[in-house]
Image (cartoon, grey):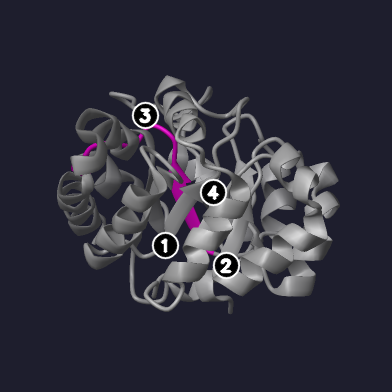
Amino acid sequence: MSKISDAFKNGKVFIPFITAGDPDMDTTKKLILEIQDNGADIIELGIPFSDPIAEGEVIQEADIRALASGTRTDKIFDMLEELKDEIKVPLVFMTYANVIFKIGSNHFMKKCSEVGVSGVIVPDIPFEERDEFANDCDEYGIDYIPLVAPTSHERIRDISKKAQGYVYVVSSLGVTGVRQNITTDLGEMTKLVKESTDVPCAIGFGISKPEQASDVCKYADGAIVGSAIVKIIAEHGKNCVPYVGKYVREMKDACK
């Protein structure tokens, strides 16, 4: 069992997402530790990118702020190197293919292993092209975490069989963002996943309220929240840390 899958052993998990460098790298360092201290089981860290096709307006704007503050992938690795002895929960990069290609897949995964990143999610690489990165992930012990969407249908089984870490179940059609209601048949989606793999699954996209987190945990092994947290960061800027910590604690409690 990988370090990521191991995080699911003690019950339902909460997985918060933040964009590295939003609003700056020093705040990101404080956020990672605050989120960890308030109950996050796994932390997804977005690498800012100029064309994040899976992201809605909230995270797009976070990417713009991060890039404007001078955030670059090598600086994110440097920051995590500084923090690695203090981080006790698994870290997962959410990034795009061009970011990895620019550095080189093998070198990127090697750096991940050196700074304590346990997994990667690459939304713009289809399942059929997973070997672009999966082989290098295997070499360095990095989990290659797949996404399954409401439109994946029977492909959910094929995708899940190759899953590592956890299966990221996309709750809704479209891009990331807060949604008032989630109408997808999450029970059926997670049933297909669980029939195909022993790897845990977590549901993301659109979750923002404690009751939504509680609801999705009836089907899945955990809940993933990004845009709602990024909105708090956008509202409070460098003063966001305690506000994010309070929110993470409330959401973690809802997942139990």
Nearest to the observer: residue 235 or residue 202:
235
Q: Amino acid at mark 1?
A: Ile
**Residue 134, image x, y percentages:** 78, 58
Q: Amino acid at mark 3?
A: Ile
Q: Residue at x 38, y 32 (%)?
A: 206
Q: Report the Cα–Cα distance between label 1 and label 4.
A: 13 Å
Find disc 2 in the rendering and name its residue: 118
Q: Tag 1 or tag 2, which sits nearer the N-term?
A: 1
Q: Quadrant of residue 231?
A: top left
Q: Quadrant of residue 209?
A: top left
Q: Which residues are magenta?
A: 200-210
What is the crowding at mark 1: few (fewer than 14 residues within 10 Å), some, or many (at least 20)? many
**Foreground label between 4 and 2:** 2
Q: Tag 2 or tag 4, which sits nearer the N-term?
A: 2
Q: Report the Cα–Cα distance between label 4 and label 3.
A: 16 Å
Q: Amino acid at mark 4?
A: Tyr
Q: Which residue in the rendered view is the most extreme toward the front? A: 70
Find disc 3 in the rendering and name its residue: 182
Kindly tell me whether residue 218 is visible in this rendering. Answer: no
Q: Residue at x 42, y 78 (%)?
A: 85
Helix, strand, or loop for circle 3?
loop
Which numbered circle lies on residue 42?
A: 1
**Residue 32, image x, y percentages:** 35, 58
**Does the stretch in magenta take in 110?**
no
Q: Report the Cα–Cα distance between label 4 and label 2.
A: 15 Å
Q: Residue at x 53, y 58 (%)?
A: 92
**Residue 168, image x, y percentages:** 54, 48
Q: Tag 3 or tag 1, which sits nearer the N-term?
A: 1
**Foreground label between 1 and 4:** 1
Find disc 4 in the rendering and name its residue: 168
Q: Tag 3 or tag 4, which sits nearer the N-term?
A: 4
